[in-house]
Image (cartoon, rainbow, N blue to C red):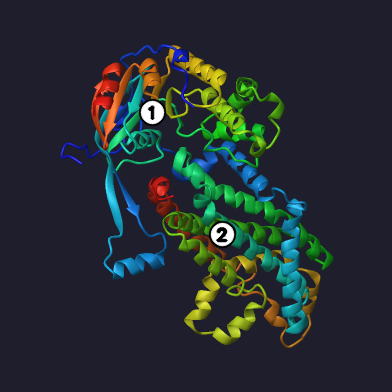
Amino acid sequence: MTPNIADVPTSAAVPTDREMVRVEHVSKRFSLRHDRSLKELVFSALQRKKLADTFMALDDVDLTVHAGETVGLIGFNGSGKSTLLKTISGVLFPDAGRVMLRGRVAGLIEVGAGFHPDLSGRENVFLNGAILGMSREQLEERFDDIVAFSEIEEFIDTEVKYYSSGMFLRLAFSVAVHTDPDIFLVDEILSVGDEPFQKKCLERIRELQAAGRTMVVVSHELEMLQKLCTRIVVLRKGKIIFDGDPTEAVAVLRAS
Amino acid sequence: MTATAPTRRTPSAAERAEGWKAPGQDAGWLNPLKERFLLRLLVKKELRVRYRGSVLGMVWSYVKPAVQFLVFYIAMGVFLELNKGTPAYAVYLFSGIVVVNLFGEVFGNATRSITGNGALVAKIYIPSQLFPWASMMVALVHFLPQLLVLVVGAVLNGWLPSPTAAVAFLLGMLILLVFTMGLGMLTAALNAAFRDVENFVDLIVMVATWLSPVLYRIDMVQKSLDGTIWWWLYQLNPLTIVVQLFHVAFWRYSKPVVDELATDHPFAYTLAQPGEPYGLWWAGLLIAVAVFVVGTIVFERSKRRFAQEL
């Protein structure tokens, strides 16, 4: 669901000079392997069929993010936004170039990716919190806040598979925003839940900005990003074609 | 890729001093020790998911080996009359079965641990060593009740705990776990690229019962293979070594076996295990460590590609 643009708060981010993320000449090539099994591989080799198609998901990308900045990544589908985010989070490794980070990172690549339907809400909060890098003490301390934020107190001991999709996403988002990293990597998760909850999420993002957290956000909600970000990077076919003022960036993407 | 691409992939010492690190740079094979909290939660999840919607739950981990034991006991012990030549054959049989079961479960689960957690591996960064380790710990949870049954059975057969038994058991466990984890990490990494590997592993597990002295006695193998290279290969199989250590721990020094050895029955001497009490433990440990090192290296090298292969 698209957030109501009137609800999106203006950016509270305060950019500083301290560099937090450095992406240097990063390239990533994906090969789409057609065959999965050994048998098929042998047969295709015998028939001299091409074993894989490759394409450049990221092509010599350079990007520096400073502490306190909120950087938006925009581009059409397949432009490499998510690949870049995954490379920064450590899920993917660049084929060339390197990525360096300062401080702790939490990659909110997909809300609820670590959730298991057969575990209760409580168990999922602990498992996901730990996956996102929280220690047991932190989790025990913040557990009540997490549950309160998600507003599903009465169902916290129910298995997640009985949750409605809205409840599920609320709990997942709640865990994610209560991890306390220096760098947040956010992929298309600001369109979670109903309107009141979205408002609350955006409020929370604003709080994190005000607290000096660094954020890299991927989204297709251009208007929202325009208000939320201090800087926007436009990607096309794995290359950065614009890096700078949010309003201009959106114009560049729309013109292309 | 351009000519200006820097050759360095990780931060230099000076950059590290400024607090820079590469994403996904972790403690490698030591991760399971560093991330104990997350590891425990993953084990809990695995156990919970395994027994979801099951009425008997953990009881299944008693039922399966019990049935397996009964079948083998009747087929091998009663029909093939191994029962007669081997005192306390039931204990002999079961101490081997628990070894092969643990091997099979650790090996099989570890192989599937990366592909089975694909949703996580592809989306969120977690030290991926935790997955094979979590499957090993799940297997150990299932092993515990079997061990308990084995100990009770051994005691009923006139076995008493001794320092020799304790050393043999601990050595056996050490060799078995190090060896199997090495294999498991190797196959987990390969399985991410080729799903054929898990079927191949199932095959190995199936054959393992017969390639170590679980159902029959090792002197029977010696009789037919003695002097050939096969006999040495058979003896150097780490599973053979572990199974024998378990025999020493739970069967060899129980009363019926000791009594039988003391008689002047012409074949009584065959009950003594080669190289008593610990046999080729050093060779087993050496092979296990070598396999573990190879498995870890292969796993470490391929883990960077897991996310894109799944």
How crowded is the residue under tag 2: few (<14 C-alpha within 10 Å), some, or many (20+)? many
Q: Is residue B238 visible?
A: yes
Q: Secondary structure at mark 1?
A: loop
Q: Chain of mark 1?
A: A
The amino acid at mark 2 is Gly
Q: Where residue B215 sits in the image (x, y, percent)?
A: 67, 75
- Residue A220 - label: 1
Taking depth in this image into account, of B152 and B71 the one nearest to the observer is B71
Question: Marks 2 and 1, how far apart in space?
Answer: 42 Å
Q: Residue furthest bottom?
A: B266
Give the quarter of the figure containing the C terminus of chain A.
top left
- Whether residue A19 sits left or right of residue B275 in the image: it is left
Residue B92's place in the image compared with A222, above or below, is below
Taking depth in this image into account, of A69 and B143 the one nearest to the observer is A69
Taking depth in this image into account, of B73 and A218 the one nearest to the observer is A218
Q: Secondary structure at mark 2?
A: helix
Q: Residue at x 51, y 61 (%)?
A: B198
**Residue wearing tag 2:** B108
Q: Where residue B195 sits in the image (x, y, percent)?
A: 46, 59
